[in-house]
Image (tube, rainbow, N blue to C red):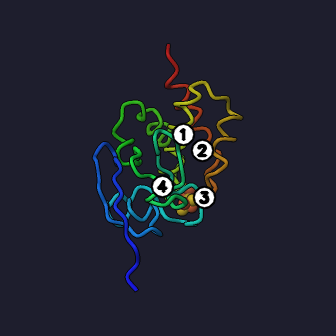
Amino acid sequence: MTPARATVTLTVNGVARTLDVEPRETLLDVLRERLDLTGAKRACDRGECGACAVLVDGRPINACHVLALQVRGREVVTIEALAGRPEFQPILAAFIHHDAGQCGFCTPGFALAAHALLQRHPAASDALIRWELVGHICRCNAYDGLAAAVAAARDARKPS
Ligand code: FES
Ligand code: FES
């Protein structure tokens, strides 16, 4: 039997997209398989590791855990677009400086989470930084470097 399909219109990295999807397709499916945006990684595929994080209306979500139909009309930003933004550059520099990525598979999710955290809490404490990164898993155990990088990005972004 041919699966039912539906039309979804959303904005991805500032570009309006209209897609014909199956109801079971996730936002991650659409980003990776239809739009060639592979910065959001597929790891657990069940909402537990944060590797697939993207911003929806400015808030971080796990794209594997949201159906494409659920983000109709919403604004999605992926790490590909975020990487070029001026406010993201301190995070990028701090991740490099603190060697926060080893295999790098988790890095886009952590970096996106760091951005979302520092947007909401520019003066986040070290404890809050660790707390907010809890939903992300790094199989290379780079947690200390990741937390240090986010703290360094916080300090670099502070107004002088
Ligand atoms: S791949 Fe989405 S949370 Fe793990
Ligand atoms: S750097 Fe390898 S999973 Fe985090």
In space, the residues marked 1 and 2 are separated at their CA atoms by 13 Å
Looking at mark 3, is its residue's CB closer than 8 Å to ligand 1? Answer: yes
Most distant residue in the bottom direction = 1
What amino acid does circle 2 point to? Gly
Residue highlighted by disc 3: 49
Snapshot quadrant of residue 65: bottom right
Residue 112: image location, x then y, percent: 49, 44
| Above or below: residue 83 compared with residue 120 | below
Contact between labelled residues 1 and 3, with CB atoms less than 8 Å apart: no
| Above or below: residue 61 compared with residue 127 | below
Q: Residue at x 53, y 45 (%)?
A: 60
Residue highlighted by disc 1: 114
The secondary structure type at the circle numbered 4 is: helix
In space, the residues marked 2 and 4 are separated at their CA atoms by 35 Å
- Mark found first going from the N terminus, 2 or 4: 4
What amino acid does circle 4 point to? Gln
Of the pair 106 and 3, the residue shown nearer to us: 3
- Check residue 159 in the rendering and tell me which mark sits there, or answer none: none
Residue highlighted by disc 4: 70
- Mark found first going from the N terminus, 3 or 2: 3
In space, the residues marked 3 and 2 are separated at their CA atoms by 18 Å
What amino acid does circle 1 point to? Ala
